[in-house]
Image (cartoon, helix red, strand yellow):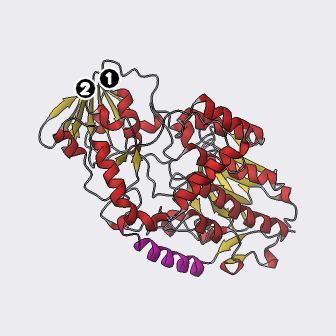
Amino acid sequence: MLSHRNDLRIAIIGAGPAGLCMAIQLKKAGFENFIILEKAAGLGGTWYHNRYPGCACDIPSHLYSYSFEIKEDWSRPYAPQQEILEYLEHCSQKYGVEKHCRFECTVDRSVWDEKNNEWTLELRSGETLSANIVISAVGMFNDLNYPEIDGLERFEGTVFHSARWNWNHDLSGENVGVIGSAASAVQFVPEIVKQAKKVNYYQRTANWVLPKEDDPFTEETLAHLRSDPLAAKAIRDEIFNQLDSAGPGAFEMLRPHMESSGKQNLELVNDPALREKLTPQHPWGCKRPLFSNHYYPAFNQPNLELVTEPIEKLTTHSIVNIDGEEREIDTLILATGFQTTKYLSSINVIGRSGIDIQEAWNDGAQAYKGVTTAGFPNLFMLYGPNTNSDSLITMIEYHVEHALLHIQRIANEALDWVDVKADHMAAYNEQLQRDIAAVSVWHAGCTDYYRAPSGRIVTQWPHTMSTHQKMLAVLDLDAYETSPPESKLR
């Protein structure tokens, strides 16, 4: 019978912000028998992998840190990638969780063993592990999205995804093609224009790009923040309260101001014809908001060409548009993002009665309160379906706290497993989708980032962050079934 905290074998998949937070809180709660399985060579998750030029956070730095480990001396309001990675490494070392990590360790399959009431994890190395509890900390930004373009495999130049930047390749003097015009491109295109001979920038859809107040903090400000620990917390609380004051329900109210700010930012482009092509045709809030002070000025450089005609094909050394225009390129950078709506798609997860989680989610991923999903006992998701909101770190902390309540219950009551009831999950998601339907801008014709192929919005949380926290603060015991007495290990 599972009766002691160290009897529980816990596997955390992913050593990014979510996995590290879970590990730290497990240690604080007295759980030591856990392992973090990370496919990369180091910790950090998306901040380990995304190292493209100009990579930075688009959430204010002071909110992009754990509430229990507030960083006082961020260098600027929106921290660059390296600084965030260093912060996560600091947290790992301070709280002693790095020793629990196994790097370059890819989980290909996770199967619920109904006889032994545990998960069997199959690693790419051929090794097999077992765990009573599995924590999915793989997040939304782990499964790269590659475009389906005729001839991509024929291209003989250098090709890489922006989330796997090839720093061994020098773009100096090259003709570079960039496909994709969202978050990563907005940050790296202004940087590579300084280096490349020519950048052909292929835009399918223009996005709203707003300015951001990102001047580096002065030494005087940093000295004050370092000397007064409460000062950084006050800034963090103020940012949270501003973001949490209304939630997505305020999008319609905010939209005129945001679009006005975006149009003002567009005025940094000198050419009126270019400005027109860069002007979004969808309302602000329909897609992920973007922020940059350097994106639009880059279009004033003679070596950056915006291409809006759809791509027909690639040849061995060029991109051909449907209008017949052909542009020679040496290097192709795919700024095509991630498959954000395909939760857990990189792992073959098999639950009770042999059901595949992707089959269970054939209409789009869904969960109960974002953390558990019916038919998959003792599987807890961090930043799971319909939990995307203003601050990733803040929402992750709420999910970790909720998962820990389940884990403590399993340990304290000597349960083999807990599983959310299908009818409770269905009722929760029916109401959730009704609430999502009330956020009209999410239904203004944009696709991909929020929506599953079925059309269901599977990423977004339609209320405030504090509402999410209150919902997760206690366990809804009636919503869960547990292992019957006769199944207990003896």
Q: In the depicted view, which residue is nearer to us: 17 or 126?
A: 17
Say left or right for 467 vs 327: right
Q: Quarter-wise, where is residue 478 in the image?
A: bottom right
Residue 280, image x and y in percent?
A: 27, 52
Say left or right for 412 vs 11: right
Of tags 2 and 1, which is closer to the observer? Answer: 2
Residue 323, image x and y in percent?
A: 12, 42
Mark 1 element type = loop
Q: Is residue 333 above or below residue 372?
A: above
Determine the residue positioned at 77% across, 78% down: 484
Mark 2 touching mark 1, by CB under 8 A? yes
* Image quarter (top left, top right, bottom left or bottom right) of the C terminus: bottom right
* Image quarter (top left, top right, bottom left or bottom right) of the N terminus: bottom right
Three-letter amino acid code of the residue under disc 1: Ala
Determine the residue positioned at 58% across, 55% down: 240
* Residue 126 visible at all: yes
- Residue at label 2? 303
Q: In the depicted view, which residue is nearer to us: 221 or 166?
A: 221
Mark 2 element type = loop
Q: Determine the main secondary structure of the stretch shown in magenta.
A: helix
Q: Quarter-wise, where is residue 268 in the image?
A: top left
* Residue 123 visible at all: no
Determine the residue positioned at 53% across, 37% down: 49
Three-letter amino acid code of the residue under disc 2: Asn
Determine the residue positioned at 33% across, 48% down: 262
Q: Is residue 78 magenta?
A: no
Residue range (magenta): 422-440
Q: Closer to the N terminus: mark 2 or mark 1?
A: 1
- Which label was assigned to residue 196? 1
